[in-house]
């Protein structure tokens, strides 16, 4: 049974493979924000894994976090997740990341419905998105799109900032219809 207070800690050592330069989220050889957040999401998933029915998993709707300090190659980083709310199948987590005792970032992992509510009530304010680069590679009936952009937003009272983001999407065409290929390898029809 999933209960408030369940916790898990996930760890990694910063290598070149998880730096901002390597993943495309920045131009410094430090832990990339998306990789810190992926570690947080991993901790959230593993916090409840043993309480889920066999063959079930968690799916994140929204993760938000600050990133307060950089971590250089060789630093040990740990992400902690704790269940803070359970509402049926919806689980909320407090997430944080540390290097030693230094707080690197903290935030929440929320269901999609709550994320959309926070945009509507002004807790999350998005001001602009600027595309820096969009590249598309086509190979027969398959394509891959990579987009890099900058998002200007104010989140959870932390002031207005600009974040560099990157997204990769895989697309496939079957019988003349275009589909987006999800992480779970499910086809999502493009309209």
Image (spheres, grey):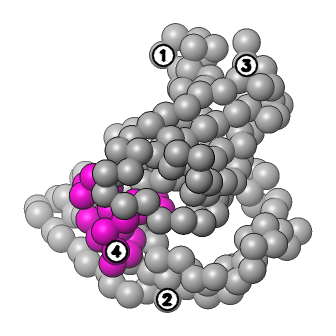
Residue beneath label 3, please? 2
| Residue of label 4 | 28
166 to 47, vertically: above or below = below
Label located before the other in sequence (4 or 1):
4
Q: Is residue 144 magenta?
A: no
The span picked out in magenta is 15-34
Q: Which mark is residue 130?
A: 2
Residue 53 place in picture, x, y as percent: 59, 12
166 lies above or below 110: below
Q: Residues within 10 Å of mark 4 (few under 14, many from 20)?
A: some
From the image, state whether disc 3 or disc 2 is nearer to you: 3
Q: Position of residue 68 (x, y in %)?
A: 60, 66
- Circles 4 and 3: CB distance less than 8 Å? no
Q: Nearer the viewer, mark 1 or mark 2?
A: 2
Q: Residue at x 59, y 46 (%)?
A: 101
Earlier residue among tags 4 and 3: 3
Callout 2 secondary element: strand
Among the two numbered marks 3 and 2 on one chain, the one whose residue lies closer to the N terminus = 3
- Secondary structure found at label 1: loop
Gap between marks 3 and 1 measured at Cα: 16 Å
Nearest to N terminus: mark 2 or mark 4: 4
From the viewer's side, name the closer residue of 66 and 100.
Answer: 100
Q: CA distance from mark 1 to mark 2?
A: 40 Å
């Amino acid at each position: 049974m999933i209960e408030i207070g369940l916790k898990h800690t996930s760890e990694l050592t910063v290598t070149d493979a998880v730096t901002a330069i390597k993943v495309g989220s920045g131009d410094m050889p430090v832990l990339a924000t998306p990789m810190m957040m992926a570690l947080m999401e991993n901790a959230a998933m593993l916090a409840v894994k043993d309480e889920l029915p066999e063959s079930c998993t968690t799916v994140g709707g929204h993760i938000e976090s600050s990133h307060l300090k950089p971590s250089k190659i060789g630093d040990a980083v740990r992400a902690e997740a704790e269940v803070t709310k359970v509402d049926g199948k919806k689980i909320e987590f407090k997430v944080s990341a540390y290097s030693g005792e230094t707080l690197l970032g903290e935030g929440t992992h929320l269901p999609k419905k709550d994320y959309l509510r926070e945009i509507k009530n002004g807790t999350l304010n998005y001001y602009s998105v600027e595309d820096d680069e969009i590249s598309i590679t086509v190979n027969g009936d398959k394509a891959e799109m990579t987009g890099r952009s900058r998002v200007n937003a104010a989140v959870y009272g932390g002031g207005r900032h600009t974040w560099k983001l990157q997204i990769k999407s895989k697309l496939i065409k079957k019988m003349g219809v275009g589909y987006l290929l999800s992480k779970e390898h499910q086809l999502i029809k493009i309209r």
